Amino acid sequence: MTEQELERRQQEFDAKVANEERIEPKDWMPDDYRKTVLRQMSQHAHSEVIGMQPEGNWITRAPTLSRKAILLAKIQDEGGHGLYLYSAAETLGTSREDMVEALHLGKAKYASIFNYPALTWADMGAIGWLVDGAAIVNQVSLQRTSYGPYSRAMIRICKEESFHQRQGYQIMLVLARGSTEQKAMAQDALDRWWWPSLMMFGPHDAESAHTAKSMQWKLKRESNDQLRQKFVDQAVPQAEFIGLKMPDPDLHWNEDRGHYDFGKIDWDEFWRVVSGDGALQPPTSGTPYQSPGGRRLGTRRHACL
Ligand code: BYC
């Protein structure tokens, strides 16, 4: 391709992005854009599939038949989301096998939150409420992403995610209004899942390798910090409503900003977990599990309440 031709195509691409038109698989696109969409979609697809695992472990231990059926349906949806996303990524000329191989070789990532264990039934509540809740905040924004197949996959996925978030919140609500032990179990799950949920949005904007370029391409419509703030503002009143306390002494409403201020995220823990440090030694009876960052993770005694 001549230099003029390349420039013309780049201008056409830029104009489409500026006019809020979607980039479709057969359209010309800059190599870096192709690489970045593919990286994000494959990571997203892997996260959906890997994310089935912590919840999958609780299908046989769900406390009632109805809870079991709901959890099963929810996990099945996650598998479906993975498939939509692998298909959307395949429109860029890769194959599902190649994406999975990249994951196995450690060349592709998945959301680090799924390296944390689901220790009690309340974790099913916390995952739905917080992990799906954080995912929705991000995915609602991604419905307007510039890559057509990704945007359409997100529209479909968001409809199902709102059910996931509500089923998780409802589990927490029931536990929080239950016995003293049940309330303690819900609080323990919130304590363990809150900070990893904030990490789901990725590093702060100033540290984020891809955000500036992805925002310019309208691949990402809001930055990691903007989305994280939206999530905090939404989750704090939800916790208050069910009488649970966020595990953050620095959390408070900032009248001037019109948002909640919150404490420092432990980025060392984030990077350790991203690089695979998620395996835990099971405790001996009554000994607390340790999170990858050293936070107390509850005890085996809680597991089947
Ligand atoms: N975990 O420049 P940055 C679900 C990496 S599943 C691991 O900000 P970007 C569910 C990042 O990849 C839905 N790695 O990146 C399923 C990059 O490394 P590389 C999950 C992370 O892409 C079952 C480096 O850090 N949702 O809902 O601009 C049950 C620098 O980051 C993470 C999605 O996947 C992380 N959390 O922004 C329940 C959303 N964060 O690739 C629920 C789609 C960052 O250069 N993805 N890294 O080696 C996105 O929106 C964006 O990729 C992110 C990161 C906001 C996550």
Image (cartoon, rainbow, N blue to C red):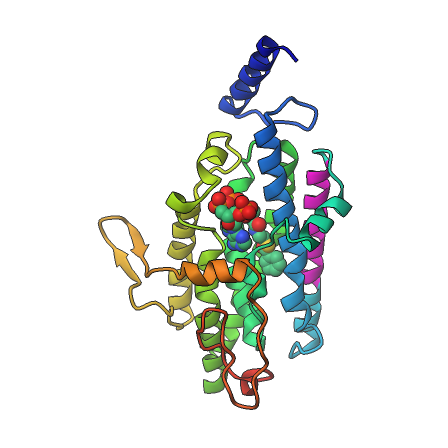
Q: Determine the residue positioned at 46% across, 42% down.
A: 209
Q: Residue at x 39, y 56 (%)?
A: 232
Is residue 8 shown left or right of residue 96?
A: left
- Span highlighted in magenta in the image: 73-90
Mainly helix, strand or loop, the magenta region? helix
Give x and y (percent) for residue 98. 74, 45
Q: Nearer the viewer, residue 70 or 289?
A: 289
Residue positioned most to the bottom: 285
Vertically, is 9 above or below 254? Answer: above
Instruction: Give the residue drawn at x 56%, y 18%.
Output: 10
Q: Residue 66's image quarter?
A: bottom right
Q: Position of residue 257 (x, y in %)?
A: 26, 48
Question: Which part of the image, by quadrant, shows the C terminus?
Answer: bottom right
* Residue 38 appearing in the image: yes
The reply, left or right, for residue 266 in relation to residue 44 is left
In-image side of 231 versus 151 (left or right): left
Q: Is residue 55 left or right of residue 291?
A: right
Vertical side of 82 occupied by 153: above or below = above
Figure quadrant of the N terminus: top right
Residue 166 shows in the view: no
